[in-house]
Image (cartoon, coloured by chain):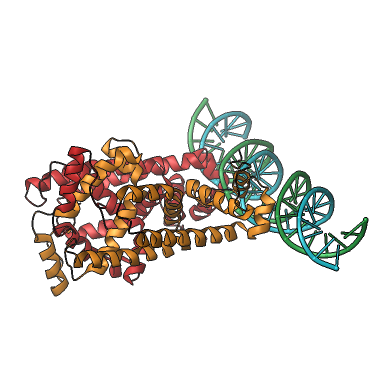
Chain colours: A red, B orange, C cyan, D green
Amino acid sequence: MCSIDATDDRTTLARIRDAAIVRFGEVGFSKATVRDIAAAAGVSAGLVLHHFGSKAGLRETCDDYVVAEFARSRVEAVESGETDPFAAMASVQAEQHLMRYFLQSLREGSPAAGRLFAASFEETLRLMELSVEQGVIRPSDNLHDATAVLLAWQFGGMLLQEHVARVMGVGTDVAEMMPRYACASLEVLTHGVFADTRYEDAWREFAANGEPPPTEEDPA
Amino acid sequence: MCSIDATDDRTTLARIRDAAIVRFGEVGFSKATVRDIAAAAGVSAGLVLHHFGSKAGLRETCDDYVVAEFARSRVEAVESGETDPFAAMASVQAEQHLMRYFLQSLREGSPAAGRLFAASFEETLRLMELSVEQGVIRPSDNLHDATAVLLAWQFGGMLLQEHVARVMGVGTDVAEMMPRYACASLEVLTHGVFADTRYEDAWREFAANGEPPPTEEDPA
DNA sequence: TAGTCTACTGAACATGTGTTCAATCGATGC
DNA sequence: GCATCGATTGAACACATGTTCAGTAGACTA
């Protein structure tokens, strides 16, 4: 029931916080109980409240910590160059519980989710601008909004991982899922899905004239 | 507190079910209370349980109903031709609470979400195949997976609507949000985001050789 | 050594919520 | 008119869970 041992040199506070991050990430804030978290940290429920004031206070601490950890790991990645995809994958693996926490926050709509999404957006936007300069990404006069949409698709895809796996007929683990998902999204992101620009043109005309396009604009 | 009036000719059972669908869609299954739903339907909590056995039973009924309603409205749309975008928009508006219910199910991971996602996938896949035949969608040897990914992006984008709106600097209502979102996604879905096929090529090589691509495969 | 302070516990408390149940009401059939 | 049966209610129950609190132990200080 309790996941600590004698070699755990984290402070009690840190143990509680880490256990909470794991638990919140697994079942979400509302379904995680203070008693569960306390047991996982090897302490009593009273102590959790003693240190963090309330369950909400505990969440705030976790939020701040996760936001800071994400920021830290990105700074590290940038500083170290991080061109090795295996190293990148390993670090993602190490941050798995942080990502789970983030995805749960996104589901439940906590304030931290907004902060993390916004931070992620700023970072991605810079990366996109850089990639445009390097000729990797198509130039666009609408890069800002495109980045927002792509980011939402990326995280949205993660949120719906289970459903995508099911209709694809594979398991939900990354090893099985990733190749199929990556392949399909690469194709879409490289060539688009529309055979020509008719929908885009119709949209442009609509935006200019205030006349609605003659057909639905997104059959996907 | 109670949203019924003398002109409401729905049966009590239907009123409870409809109130539950609205409430589940607003706050999710776990946060919606039987007492709330009962009050909204203008009955006592006891009656809800009398008719549906349990809160879980109520959800099952709602699930079945929503699945059937979505199916019905689509059959109707197909049968009636439904080429008028205004009519389509109006019907979507009328189904707003059903869509909210679906999105909440997606968030909370209810069985109905899986059913609806799968049904939606089958339908979209047929539509995609048709669109390829008509020359609207690019042909692909991977249409099945691409459809799954696009569907996840579409629903995922809806789930994260609030966050997208915030980083775009607009309100979350469709009127403000839709033009920006549609414009950006149309551009991506028409032209892709990558300037060339280097990532796709790298991926192909990886898939063939088992050698990982030299850089990260998705800067978005 | 005495005092104080902090970490920590376990029990108790308060509340929200799903569920049960006896009682009532109203319609329907005999 | 009477009986029966389903719809309906309101109160009570059971349980989970956040929170409080008195009390204990150990460490640190004067």
Quarter of the rendering containing residue A159: bottom left
Camera sees residue A180: no
The x, y position of residue D18, in whole percent, is: 56, 43
Relative vertical location of residue C15 with respect to residue B219 in this rendering, above or below: above
Residue D19 falls left or right of residue A18: right
Residue B219 falls left or right of residue B124: left
Q: Residue at x 46, y 59 (%)?
A: B69
Quarter of the rendering containing residue A126: top left
Q: Nearer the viewer, residue A54 or B220?
A: B220
Q: Nearer the viewer, residue B101 or A78?
A: B101
Q: Residue at x 19, y 56 (%)?
A: B218
Camera sees residue B70: yes
The x, y position of residue A95, in whole percent, is: 31, 54
The x, y position of residue A194, in whole percent, is: 17, 58
Residue A131 falls left or right of residue B30: left
Q: Nearer the viewer, residue A45 or B107?
A: B107
Q: Nearer the viewer, residue A154 or A60?
A: A154
Q: Residue at x 30, y 40 (%)?
A: B177
The x, y position of residue A200, in whole percent, is: 17, 49
Residue A82 falls left or right of residue B114: left
The C terminus of chain A - image quarter: bottom left
